[in-house]
Structure formats: structure tokens, C-alpha cells
Amino acid sequence: MTTNESMSTANRIADEIKSLSPTNLRLKYMEVFGESPTSNSRPGLIKKIVKALVERAEMERARQAAAPARRRRGQPVTGADAPAAPGDASTGERGAHEASGERVAERDPRLPPPGTVIEKLDRRGAIRCKCTVLEHGIRYAGKEYRSLSAAAKAAMEDLGLKGAANAYLFWGLIRQAARKDATEILDKAGQRYLRSVESLNGCRASMTDEMKNRIKEMLARQGERLAEAAREF
């Protein structure tokens, strides 16, 4: 890969990564490196992800460039360098990509076994959409895609969803990590609420009886709602 090609690839990847939300950026890091980031620095995470993806792209291009020479020398060509088998229905769009000279993407080892049906469910457990894992791609809505991301993008368009999303998160293959402990968030919110109530108590002397009664009613209703939420949790 030439310097210009490398810079172009880096700029393209950087633009895609920069558009991710903080949560999706961390998920992308986990997708690329297989572990959670130890830093919350957005520029640092972007730099590491872009560097890793550019290096992978350069290695992939080098393998493709070396494949014809190995064939001429009679050496075996396997894995990512192997040409697509014509007429193989399990490979989705292989025929079209082979005709255009485009290499079929190597199967992502993080995917479930071929034949697995992945269902995206809503909060009530109803199926919103689903796809099937193939040996060299993903089948969604009767069409075969070369990657889980491409299938997720098509599904998002069908569902009317906009923006970028982590494909593994979209299909429910990974869970979105909570930014903070839920109890910590709730405790801080409760403390802010109590401080607000205490500040009102300090102003009671200047309040009318009507205002005091309204505040009492509001606090009573809010207490009832909190008690109901506690019972339903």
C-alpha cells in the first residue's frame, strides 16, 4: 500500500470512528482488540483503533498482492487469498465479486456457527428482524451480505433507524456496558432531590399556606410513585 493509499485509508476510517458515540466507541475498541479500553480518552481510543485497522488493511492488501505470485510459483493459496468457488450458493455474493475481481471477505471468527439464526428482539421480546449466519456472509431479508455490519445497516434502514451502530450490539451478540453502577446513579439522583426539598424547607417562612399545601401534595404524590416503583422493580 502506497503512502497516499495508507493516508486515504486512515482518513476514511478516522471519519467513521469519529462519528461514533462514546459508548459505541468503547464497543468498537472491544470489537477490534477483544478487551475493554483502560482509558476514557476519546482521541486516544480513536488513534489506537485507526492505527490497528489501517495495519490490518495494509496486511490484507499485501496478502492479495502476493497471491498471484504464489500461484505462478505453484504454491498453495489458502484462506483470505483463495478465490471464490463459482456457483457456491452458500457464499452469497461470491459469483458477482469473483467476476469483478473483488476478494470475498474472510469469515469473522467471532460470528456464531453457520446456520445460526440471530434474532433482534424489542423490549417485550418480539422479533424485530433476524438474519442467518452463512459460511461466508449473512443472509437478511432474502439477500446475502458479506458482513454482519452490512446486514445490520440494511436492517436499520428497514426499521427506519438512523446513525451508526455496532453490528454486534445491534444483533444482540454483545451487551452494552453500563457507564456507571446503577445504584450509584440512583443514589446521586436521590441526594439531589433531598437537597432540593431541604432548600424548600428553608423558605417555609416566606411561603403562603396555599403554597405549603401544594408542596405537601406534590411530595406525597412523588412518594407514592417512588413506593410503587420500588414494588414493581
Image: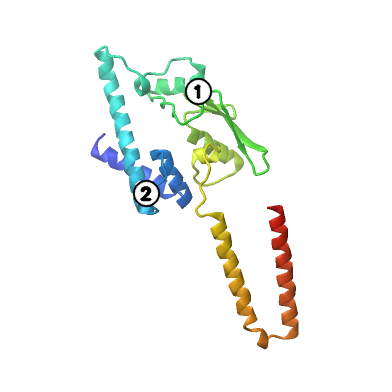
Left or right of residue 168: residue 225: right
Q: Residue furthest top?
A: 74
Question: Please, what is the three-letter code of the amino acid marked with disc 1?
Answer: Gly
Q: Which mark is residue 45?
A: 2
User: On screen, 213 above or below 62?
Assistant: below
Tell me which residue sits at (67%, 84%) in the image: 204
Q: Could you tell me if the residues under marks 2 and 1 are in contact, i.e. CB atoms within 8 Å?
A: no
Tell me which residue sits at (35%, 18%) in the image: 78
CA distance separating discs 2 and 1: 34 Å
Asked which quadrant contains residue 56, the reply is: top left
Q: Which mark is residue 232?
A: none
Marked residue nearer the N-terminal end (2 or 1): 2
> Looking at the picture, how far across and down is residue 100, in whole percent?
40, 23
Question: Please, what is the three-letter code of the amino acid marked with disc 2?
Answer: Leu
Asked which quadrant contains residue 125, the reply is: top right
User: On screen, 135 above or below 30?
Assistant: above
Q: Which residue is mark 1?
A: 92
